[in-house]
Amino acid sequence: MVMHSDRAGTSTEPSVLLTDLYQLTMAHAYFELGMRETAVFEVFVRRLPRSRQFLVAAGLAQVLEYLEGLQFTAADIGYLATLDLFPQPFLEHLATLRFTGSVDAMPEGTPFFANEPVLRITAPIIEAQMVESRIVNLVHFQTLIASKAARCVLVSQGRRLVDFGLRRAHGAEAAVYAARAAYLAGFQATATVAAGRQFGIPLTGTMAHSFIETHDSEEQAFNRFVATQRHPTTLLIDTYDTERAAKRVVALIQRLKAAGAAGGVRGVRIDSGDLTAQAQLVRGIFDAAGCVDVEITLSGGLDEFSVARLLLADTPVDAFGIGTQLDVSQDAPSLDIVYKLQEYAGRARRKRSLGKETWPGRKQVFRRYNAQHQPVSDLLALSAERPPGEPLLCEVLRDARRCGEPPTLAASRDFCRERLAELPEDLRKLEAADPVYPVQVSEEVQALAQEVDRVER
Amino acid sequence: MVMHSDRAGTSTEPSVLLTDLYQLTMAHAYFELGMRETAVFEVFVRRLPRSRQFLVAAGLAQVLEYLEGLQFTAADIGYLATLDLFPQPFLEHLATLRFTGSVDAMPEGTPFFANEPVLRITAPIIEAQMVESRIVNLVHFQTLIASKAARCVLVSQGRRLVDFGLRRAHGAEAAVYAARAAYLAGFQATATVAAGRQFGIPLTGTMAHSFIETHDSEEQAFNRFVATQRHPTTLLIDTYDTERAAKRVVALIQRLKAAGAAGGVRGVRIDSGDLTAQAQLVRGIFDAAGCVDVEITLSGGLDEFSVARLLLADTPVDAFGIGTQLDVSQDAPSLDIVYKLQEYAGRARRKRSLGKETWPGRKQVFRRYNAQHQPVSDLLALSAERPPGEPLLCEVLRDARRCGEPPTLAASRDFCRERLAELPEDLRKLEAADPVYPVQVSEEVQALAQEVDRVER
């Protein structure tokens, strides 16, 4: 299973210099000033996008691998030396630097809300500061995509969902991690081969319009493609005239059946036009000919809203290919996610910048459930508090050692499915619930904020 | 200058399997069917986002490196064998496959419009098909960001623009290529260290709020940070109270001057609140104290509209840090970019799917200028036509060999600046011009489309 490790392929090799320069200038200052105390930073989203009722935590596996692999190579140090910013003793310190700290985090697949820490880093200040940029980058992107994907899953009524987004994902890593995040949130497959290899996600894909167009006729293209396939395949039927193509598919199936041929046609894909009308037309043609098992896949600029609309309109469909809208999270392409200092050298800290104030201290999220085991409210409390409710953050790395085996992607996917299933119905809808899910702040956190503010800075 | 090569760091290592599965299933079918003829594919954007008047071509350097490096490793082949889709002879064919074709493209930095090919691939069908996903992925992302960045540059009135977007860019590669694309379009620097190393882009960055918060007081943090810096630095002044912080900066500068100390304060950064009011207040404090050279950098959720608004309001500002909005192209996070078959085996081809019809044949874009050398219209013609105007696509790779030295990033940046400067004033505005820039389709292209359609498929 080495091929399915998170380490293969695109992942995290470039990470140590994948940081903002200010992390290094601050690290240098901490180094020069002899500041070595423990810092506590928390990752949270300040406000949810208007079009999200909850987010789905994702990317933790990549964060842990990044932290475990954190190391400056000689080439990295050589490059930094050219910047004329850092003296030799600091560069030598960097050369020996490893991440020695601890991580608490919500398991991947956990739904969460604004102001709730999804991940906490506890480490000597230089280490904790340096890793900010990449940790935010990793948690942000997969959380963004898992959250979008979860919305698709929640309205899909059991239809198969496949990630088609590679070509318009923002680069190589985005494509591969989008496939992972979507699978985590309940997608069934991806078209991205590198993601299949890296994470063991099932792959799908058969033909594009260009295959049809390279042939003298669509009929010839269908016949010849099927002849080359080891397994029943999916034919793309909207290149010229979808109705005529569907009839050609029926003729092909009947010919194959008569010949007792292996392989054959598993289904068709429609990628343009009025998808409901086209799918109904095609389903009618297939059913009338006794081809009731031939599946219909729909694609072409789809998102959770179009999936919901298509199903509401009783569109006969077995699978959806969802591409660009998913992989760039088109309606909310970023989250207001931050990594903020909550404690240094044993003292709580907070930022008071206008509109960007933070809650100080090491915190935990306690989720309360009703008798039907549906979440009813969350409480943002200090991690030392013991209010009722389920604590959501778990210790996953302690002094650079893993706390137990990390879950497999399949296990995280199961966990996510269970967590999504228990959400109250209002939260599972695409449109915003009113009132929104309540996240309360404990009196101890509020008191700590006041205490921190009393100190003149 | 090896460190600045496009090959270092994140770039294109994972690319050969960074493809959609259907590229491989089609390649397999072409292989089985003995189809080896030359295919011509063109990359173009079907429609511009509503909030873009033009796009800026970018990513060509990465496309060429990808094509030159295209190769399946034994591990890649081993993975594909596990899929139970491909017979051994095809896998053996893949193992020896290289890109042997040609590329014509608009130089990076060229402004372009809907339906205009920015890149054309001419190669044996298997090769030309296989590279679709990654080529679109590469051209899409950098074009997306360069186009957004160009809008920021056009309204910046000469202020310095710095890319701050790493943390919310969609993954590692997106962060690094966003920095490249923004620099190409006229940004002055990036905060992303890996992009500085990979592309030689100037780096900036000094401190975050956390540095202030780790200290007992802001004053102490300022003093101690400056003491550790080799060069004059930038202090972040909005952690607690911006006005008080500005006065502390003045006191610090006066103390340093009195002591004849090296280093010192180059400027300040404000990251929250009413930026115009804060910057005016701070500028007033500095100027009154004779600190007229202290620069003001503004950041915090900025985009081209806020830059324009801030300058319109006479905000005293020397530089803008632009992050998330740039790196995810928040208002238009994807382009409707495609890679379409235009010719196979010497015959023009087109797709007629509803709403997605394409113009067939090998095409060229001819740009016409007025007497002031401003572009006035483009003509989409066949590449064999010789209408008046400047042909925008140039041959850059012929039979897998480079046609001349590729431009450096600095040269492409100069080229982009010139091209942006010559755009008519209406196109340089943020809001859409009326009428939009005209792109005509030649009679020969239209006639060819009719001819292609006459053939029954």
Image (cartoon, coloured by chain):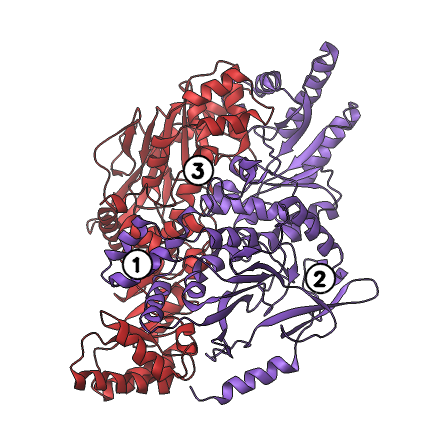
Chain colours: A red, B purple
Q: Secondary structure at mark 1?
A: helix
Q: For marks 2 and 1, give the CA distance.
A: 51 Å
Dot 1: chain letter: B
- Within-10-Å neighbours for mark 3: few <14, some 14–19, many 20+: some
Q: Nearer the viewer, residue B269 or A13?
A: A13
Q: Nearer the viewer, residue B98 or A396?
A: B98
Name the image quarter holding the C terminus of chain B: bottom left
Instruction: Indicate the amino acid at tag 3.
Output: Pro
- Expressed as whole percent of the image width and height from the top left, the position of residue B398 reads 56, 60
Instruction: Indicate the amino acid at tag 2.
Output: Leu
Mark on residue B427? 2
Q: Secondary structure at mark 2?
A: helix
Q: Is residue B105 left or right of residue B287?
A: left
Q: Earlier in the sequence, mark 2 or mark 1?
A: 1
Instruction: Give the residue pinned by disc 3.
Output: A14
Question: Residue drawn at (50%, 25%), measured in percent from left and top?
Answer: A453
- Within-10-Å neighbours for mark 1: few <14, some 14–19, many 20+: few
Discs 2 and 3 share one subunit: no
Residue B388 seen in this snapshot: yes
Mark on residue B92? 1
Closer to us: mark 2 or mark 1? Answer: 1
Q: For marks 2 and 3, give the CA distance.
A: 38 Å
